[in-house]
Amino acid sequence: MSAESSVLVVGASAAALGVAETLRRKGHRGAVTVLGAEPHQPYDRPPLSKQILAGDWTPERAWLRPPTALSALHVEFVLGDRALALDPESRTVHTESGRTLRADSIVVATGLAPRTLPDQENLAGVHVLRTFDDALALRSALLTCSRLVVVGEGVLAAEIAATARKLGVTVTMTGPQPAPLAAQLGPLAAGLLAELHAERGVSLRLGTAATGLAGRDGRVTGVRLDTGEVLPADLVVVAVGAAPVTDWLAGSGLRLDNGVVCDSRCQAEREIYAAGDVARWHHERLDALVRLENRTNATEQAVAVAANILGADLPYKPVPYLWTDPYDTRIQVFGTPRPEDDVTVVDGAVGDRRFVALCRRDGAVTGVLGWNMPKQTRLRRQELLVPAPRTSGMAVL
């Protein structure tokens, strides 16, 4: 690709901004366009469930860059216009407003859309949290509600529950896992997180799934569980995961399977790339298709995609990373641990709630888990790079 070639990034996300900034930093002089379905300039998502929801930040603090910095990039931002279709052969995108945008290279960075419960859209008082506007609407509702039920027990659900408790709201969390983040953290850390929420006043109704919502006169009154019980609520947040936004790519010929499927260079087709939550690419170290939903990956993958657009031809093979900050606790996970892995505490002590643990499978370190020890956790990350014993046959990071 020449320095004058054009690039279109679909989705005005952190990944999209990262692609644009990296292209300019590397000397690319061609036209760069960022197309976004939302009317807002690129903003940071992690603060939405914490600082923005709590009211600790003004909304503008979530912007990734001030308007002057965006202007200095000489990038055209086309906002408030949703992509409807892609023709990979001509590298043309058609939008909801009737625009036709063409570029020499296209990056799909459309992120995720929240999953919902049946009939959710027909009841007032039911929220999701994905966008800037979602966060502002939920904050407004939290200020007047008395009983909140959070449906879900993943990262987002746990952060919303923690923020709502800081605001003094009565909170119940429900979901099929036995503890918050059980699939990501394993029983030791997930159990500690359950204790932390309970200590802060969250009522945990875990190990049971929500099947639907109860309502009266068009407003939610509770959450139905698979046990037949109804948890009373005047406000409900549904945080049961999200799906990659790929519906607009139907009929494009791109391989769509839990995201846009790409090679190790994050390329789906010739000069068609994907970055961020929507990208599912071949991770050479893991020898598997991987899709990561976190802010760190969005930034790092954007850099890799921009470099490959400019001809670097480098595989993207990061160490997967997860972090969350419920209450005054910092939890970090490097690697790909599973709940069944063997866990050994190597720094600190669980009783002090300051520790680092190594997760092992067949003798290989698969994950590093840190609880309130960020520096030591980052240092232990290097142990993921140690080859597994030859007898294990495992591929490790």
Image (cartoon, grey):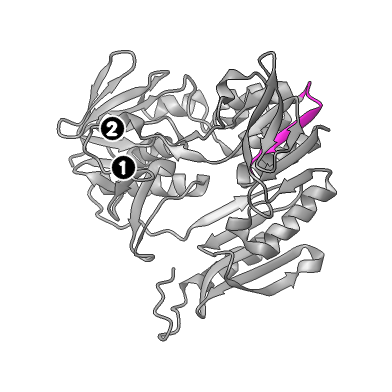
Q: Which residue is mark 2?
A: 250
Q: Is residue 351 above or below residue 175?
A: below
- Which quadrant of the structure image shows residue 165? top right
Q: What type is the residue that disc 1 sits on? A: Leu
Of marks 2 and 1, which one's residue comes earlier in the chain? 2
Where residue 78 sits: x, y (%)? 37, 20
Quarter of the image where the C terminus is located: bottom left
Q: Is residue 189 left or right of residue 167?
A: left
Q: Is residue 79 left or right of residue 58?
A: left
- Give the residue furthest to the left: 89
Where residue 146 sits: x, y (%)? 81, 26
Helix, strand, or loop for circle 2?
loop
Q: Name the residue: 70% across, 39% down.
A: 228
The magenta-colored residue range is: 143-152
Q: Which residue is mark 1?
A: 256
Where residue 38 sits: x, y (%)? 46, 22
- Which quadrant of the structure image shows residue 61? top right
Number of disc labels: 2
- Which quadrant of the structure image shows residue 1? top left
Pick the front one: 144 or 326: 144
Pick the front one: 185 or 276: 185
